Every structure is written in C-alpha cells, then in structure tokens.
Image (cartoon, rainbow, N blue to C red):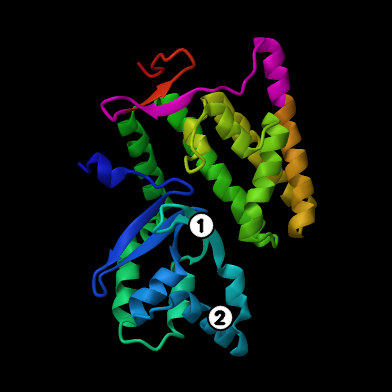
Amino acid sequence: MPNKKQLQMPFEGETKLDLFKPAGKEIRKVFHNDEWHFSVTDVIEAITDSSRPRQYWVDLKAKLSQEGMDELYGKIVQLKMPSPDGKERTTDTANTETLFRIMQSIPSPKAEPFKRWLAKVGFERLEETSSPEKAIQRAIIAYKLKGYPDDWIDARIRTILSRKELTGEWAKRGVKDSEYGILTGVISKETFNLTPQQHKDHKGIDKKDNLRDHMTDLELILTMLGEKSTTSIAVAHDSKGFDANKLAAHTGGQIAGNARKSLERELGRPVVSSKNYLPDRDNQDQLIDEGGKRLNE
C-alpha cells in the first residue's frame, strides 16, 4: 500500500523544488489551477547555463513575438515563488505544455533531456487527466490518512468536482486563467460576505494554505452551492467573456449566500467558523475547533 508521503495531494499555491539532474539545477514549481507551473527563468538557466536567465527570457519573448507566437503570452502565469533571499516574489511560470513549446525555441543540447525530465515529473498528472477517478481515489486516501471524517471527505471531493466543472465552463466561455481568482472572490464574497483571504484570516491560516482543506462541511457545501449555481447560470444565459461571467458569479454566490443566511437564522449562530485543520505536536494532522477539541475523535 502506498505510504502517506506518496499519497500527499498538492494544494493550491504549494511550492516545491525539483532537481533537474543533468544540469544539477533546482527548478521551482507551484501548484496552480490543478496542475504544476514551473519557473520559466529556472528552466532557462538549467538548459542554457545562461548567467542572465531573466534577460535571456526577455530576449526570447521578443523573438517569439517577432515569429508570431504572441498567443504564448496568454499562457504565461505570474505566480509568487520563494526567492533565494527567502522572500516570495512574482515570477513568470508555465505549465508542462507551454514549457515544451518554449523549449522548442531554445537551441540547447540540454533541451531534450529536460523534456524527458519534465515528462516524468508530469506523468502522474497526465495519468489522472486520462483517468480522473484515479485522482479522486488518491485524494480520498490522502484525506483519510490525515484523519478527516468520511462526511467531510465526501463534501470536499464534491467541491473539487464542482470547481473543475466551473473552471471548465469559464475556459470555454473566454475567461482567462488570470481572472479565475477574481470571479472566485466574487462568489466567496456573496456566499460568506468574506473574500477568500478574509476567510483565511478568520481561520488564522497562512495564505499558502488551501482554504477548502480548512473549511467545515457546511462551509464546503455552501461553497459547492455557489459554484454549481454559477455554472448553471452561465450555461443557461450562455455567458461569454469576463463581465458576463462576473454577473453570473454574483448571482450564483447570492443564491448560496441566501441559503447561508436562512440556515444561520435557524441555527442562531454564524456558519462561517474559525475551525481549522492543524498539525498536532506529533506532526499528525487533525481538525481543531475553537476550544481546542479534536473534532474527528
């Protein structure tokens, strides 16, 4: 049976270092929109030995523009990654497919082994793309190993599916990757009267942590309602582009927000909770409520 380390699922914003062995270089990567994005300048440094990889990338972008490959710019995502000085800084990143296209324009004998390395790094993701049930099963096992209760896991998996459905519709309807976060914030604000960052602050978790992994089952259910409603409205109205989908996000979030308010009136307490999923002294993850009691005991 796979061990806990093998089954650990990456979370949104998670950063890691991978070693590109042929060059002995470290490549930063960050998990974003359900796939790994790699630092473009790290890759350039690894396969060109350039002492000025940032300038090399600037010159390469100009070259690609002259060759009519401006569409690549829309696939470059600026994400925060740790720098050598320990601070997080925004850098250009690209997913596996985009990196392959960039490397085709780099004349270097190291490009081919890098392509093989990149394919190996992305194999599990490609496998999950062709067999989504494998990704779901891995997620379920990972959460079980962390000690989450079954009801919570069921709600969490459903939010993963609703999120994929929503972003899939956004992509088909002309919403850019860089705009997903804005629309997600709209849904969150309407649903919980909190932006995602305010929600994280309320729970006392770091900005790099996945908010949904810290939500209660009720928060997850309302999140799913907001997203499913937004998806259904976008489809029903055939929303195209950012503005139309922003309107759908407002409406979908309001539906979930009204459900939250009705539930709060019945419960006599807020639905939004400061409950968290935090490691204990033995580094075993557990779900903690405001009074410090382990919820899944």
Quarter where residue 199 is shown: top right
- Residue type beneath disc 2: Lys
On screen, residue 205 above or below 55: above
Residue identifier under label 2: 61
Quarter where residue 285 is shown: top left
Q: Is residue 275 a member of the stretch shown in magenta?
A: yes
Start and end of the magenta stretch?
259-284
Q: Is residue 149 a member of the stretch shown in magenta?
A: no
**Is 230 on the left-hand or right-hand side of 166?**
right
On screen, residue 96 above or below 83: below
Any part of residue 158 in sight: no
Task: Measure the C-alpha gap from mark 1 to mark 2.
Answer: 20 Å
**Is 260 on the left-hand or right-hand side of 12?**
right
Which label sits on residue 33? none
Mark 2, secondary structure of its residue: helix
| Residue 278 locus on image (x, y percent) | 40, 28
- Residue type beneath disc 1: Arg
